[in-house]
Amino acid sequence: MLWLRSFLFTLGMWIVTPIFACIAILTFPLPPITRYRIISGWALSMLWWLRVTCGIRYRVIGRENIPTEPSIILCKHQSAWETLALQQIFPPQVWVLKRELLWLPFFGWGLAMTSPIAIQRSAGREALKQMVSQGKDRLKKGFFVVIFPEGTRVSPGEKGKYHIGGAWLATHTQTQVTPVAHNAGEFWGKNAFVKKPGLITLSIGKPIATTGLKPDALNQQVESWIEQEMLRLPQL
């Protein structure tokens, strides 16, 4: 039964994604925020379909901590679920991502219309400079900036290396950071086809001011909060 329900979700995603990709391309003449609001309808429809087919729901703890001003969201990365849910939970946002993702048929084309910060990770310091330059532009336009500091999805109970990029962007733009923890990997695992029904818990921490902080110190604060919160989630 789990396999069948997961197949129905995937089938729906295959059908809807090309349609939304075409819609996304047609939004090109519109202002960036307007484009985002239209294109994010894909994520919202997928969250609804995920609940209907696979029985995956979620709750949010700390919603009151969402800033009213654009900030940088540094989020735990366990699943594809958070790439959908953050679009429903937070205000309009852009993503820092690998440039290669924009080359994917349909999905990448639509993603390109959301004003992402697409970087070449192997470029080192040049990638950091690009991130700061484009990050300033996106924040000025009213977008939140989403970054997964671990860079890739990690399994529940595991911790990846927290890369400096998000903290670097925050300190160099003097923008507060909002840390986010969740346990989505317990229900939708990394690269997993089968999805398990249940209630995902997502916790939003209090914004961290970056004034006077070095990137390393900020990165350590974010890592400490997220990993401690991951341990608390089962009791929340």
Image (spheres, rainbow, N blue to C red):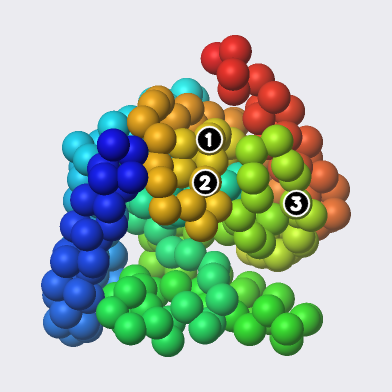
Q: Is residue 129 above or below residue 92?
A: below
| Residue occupying image coordinates x 52% and y 46% | 189
Q: What residue is shown with label 1?
A: 186
Camera-nearest residue between 119 and 144: 119
**Mark 2 to mark 3 CA distance (whole Å):** 15 Å
Residue 47 in view of the camera = no
Tag 2 secondary structure: loop
Classify residue 1 by image quadrant.
top left
Instruction: Please rate how many residues cluster around mark 1, counting C-alpha atoms within 10 Å: few if below 14, some from 14 to 19, many from 20.
Output: some
Circles 3 and 1 in contact, beta carbons < 8 Å: no
- Locate residue 203 relative to residue 89 in the image: left or right: right
- Locate residue 192 relative to residue 12 in the image: left or right: right
Q: Quadrant of the C terminus?
A: top right
Q: Is residue 228 above or below residue 184?
A: above
| Residue occupying image coordinates x 33% and y 74% | 107
Q: What residue is shown with label 3?
A: 160
Circles 2 and 1 in contact, beta carbons < 8 Å: yes
Q: Position of residue 38 (x, y in %)?
A: 19, 63
